[in-house]
Image (cartoon, rainbow, N blue to C red):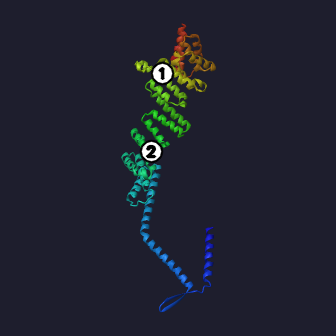
């Protein structure tokens, strides 16, 4: 369409010139005493137009001639910039391919070209320099050359980078944090993370590094909180997030040194985490272990805030969600639940005993409920009912510990009623269980 308009314009100009000059008999008279010159008007017009064109061409040629040195410098700068970009791309390609020596050499060539160039009009000169330093530092880290790595890193962390390209500076800090984590230097990693801007600290990559730093420094609480943020941002798959949160929460529970600290850790878990069977059972096991240790060590009166019945009450509160959803638990969790509840059967109140009996009636064939009900009856000296329930449970239990305890309880019941032969057989069956 543009060509059509140009063609129409040229045709209109040709028509106008033909109408103006085709039958033009005008003359232009020039007086230069004592001479007189008569010149055709068309010739004068052609001379004026031609003169203008020649003058314009001469001026343009002079301007181009004066710009030749500038164009030469611009061309050399462009070639240098292309060479630097090419070296940086080669360094990145070799780094990704695992050719660290070649990557380091290419990055150093880029830095040498940048250092030898005097041109300061490149739009991304400082960014290219910082990237070359980062690639050289990454290659040095892969080659275990920490001194050279730190030297290039300090060059990349030039404060001028914050003005020209803050993204490169943030990337350098993240890489430095990862290198510190791989060097098992938690303090240096925390220092690098603290240098990040507030916005960058909330990014997924920074949170991943913060999680690794927290786990490296055994800061389980911080690691758990960071893992929750990552799960909220969907940084992991649901299965991976659950497994990670479960592992960190288990570490926090196992790391509790007394019952008070264990209660604080449990209160710090959210509702979804407290509903996990593994965490509730682990908290109950840890509470019983700490309670036994404090009893054996004879702890002072200032630590008497969770003992005896108080421990049993809190453990039953932790395990209450498992009772409400007992049918959904697998056999392994049911066995662990039975082991966790057994130490507190002596302090079981009437409401707890009624709940246990109700569950046992709902699942009369469940060996774990039979075992718990039998042990509860044994603590209350209901010998006949205890023998009946434990006799039913011994054939259905698969957990070795529960089976061994069942036979031991049956042996004590046989001794209680004076059946020496049955007691010896029960003791023998208990001893044969691995």
Q: Which mark is residue 38?
A: none
Is residue 338 visible from the viewing direction of this image?
Answer: yes
Asked whether the residues under the numbered discs 2 and 1 touch, taking CB atoms below 8 Å apart as contact, a structural biologist would say: no
Mark 2 surroundings within 10 Å by alpha-carbon count, few (fewer than 14), some (14 through 19), many (20 or more): few
Mark 1 surroundings within 10 Å by alpha-carbon count, few (fewer than 14), some (14 through 19), many (20 or more): many
SS category of the residue bearing label 2: loop
Instruction: Look at the picture and state if 127 lies above or below 186.
Output: below
Instruction: Look at the picture and state if 425 lies above or below 163.
Output: above
Which quadrant is home to the N terminus?
bottom right
Question: Which residue position is annotated with label 1?
Answer: 288
- The image position of residue 307, as x and y in percent, is 46, 19
Question: Which residue position is annotated with label 2?
Answer: 197
Instruction: Look at the picture and state if 19 lies above or below 337.
Output: below
- The image position of residue 146, as x and y in percent, is 37, 45
**Distance between the Cα atoms at labels 2 and 1?**
45 Å
Of tags 2 and 1, which is closer to the observer?
2
Q: How many marks?
A: 2
- The image position of residue 150, as x and y in percent, is 38, 47
The image quadrant of residue 386 is top right
């Amino acid at each position: 369409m543009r060509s059509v308009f140009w063609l129409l314009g040229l045709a209109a100009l040709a028509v106008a010139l033909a109408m103006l000059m085709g039958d033009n008999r005008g003359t232009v008279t020039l007086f230069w005493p004592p001479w007189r010159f008569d010149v055709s008007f068309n010739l004068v017009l052609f001379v004026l137009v031609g003169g203008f064109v020649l003058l314009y061409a001469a001026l343009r040629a002079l301007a181009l001639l004066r710009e030749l040195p500038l164009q030469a410098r611009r061309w050399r700068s462009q070639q240098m910039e292309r060479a630097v970009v090419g070296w940086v791309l080669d360094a990145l390609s070799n780094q990704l391919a695992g050719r660290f020596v070649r990557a380091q050499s290419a990055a150093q060539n880029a830095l040498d070209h940048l250092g030898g160039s005097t041109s300061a009009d490149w739009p991304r000169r400082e960014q290219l320099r910082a990237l070359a330093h980062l690639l050289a530092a990454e290659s040095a880290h892969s080659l275990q050359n920490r001194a050279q790595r730190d030297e290039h890193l300090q060059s990349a962390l030039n404060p001028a980078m914050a003005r020209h390209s803050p993204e490169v500076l943030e990337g350098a800090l993240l890489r430095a944090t990862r290198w510190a984590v791989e060097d098992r230097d938690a303090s240096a990693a925390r220092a690098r993370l603290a240098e990040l801007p507030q916005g960058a600290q909330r990014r997924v990559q920074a949170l991943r590094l913060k999680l690794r730093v927290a786990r490296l420094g055994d800061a389980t609480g911080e690691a758990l909180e960071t893992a929750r943020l990552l799960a909220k941002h969907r940084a992991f798959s649901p299965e991976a997030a659950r497994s990670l949160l479960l592992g960190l929460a288990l570490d926090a529970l196992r790391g509790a040194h007394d019952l008070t600290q264990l209660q604080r850790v449990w209160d710090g878990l959210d509702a979804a985490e407290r509903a996990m069977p593994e965490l509730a059972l682990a908290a109950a096991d840890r509470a019983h272990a700490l309670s036994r240790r404090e009893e054996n060590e004879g702890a002072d009166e200032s630590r008497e805030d969770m003992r005896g019945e108080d421990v049993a009450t809190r453990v039953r509160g932790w395990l209450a969600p498992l009772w409400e959803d007992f049918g959904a638990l697998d056999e392994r969790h049911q066995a662990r639940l039975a082991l966790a509840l057994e130490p507190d059967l002596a302090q079981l109140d009437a409401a707890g005993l009624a709940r246990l009996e109700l569950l046992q009636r709902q699942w009369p064939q469940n060996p774990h409920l039979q075992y718990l009900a039998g042990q509860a009856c044994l603590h209350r000296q209901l010998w006949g009912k205890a023998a009946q329930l434990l006799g039913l449970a011994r054939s259905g239990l698969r957990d070795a510990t529960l089976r061994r305890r069942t036979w031991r309880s049956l042996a004590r019941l046989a001794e209680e009623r004076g059946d020496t032969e049955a007691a010896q057989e029960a003791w023998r069956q208990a001893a044969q269980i691995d």
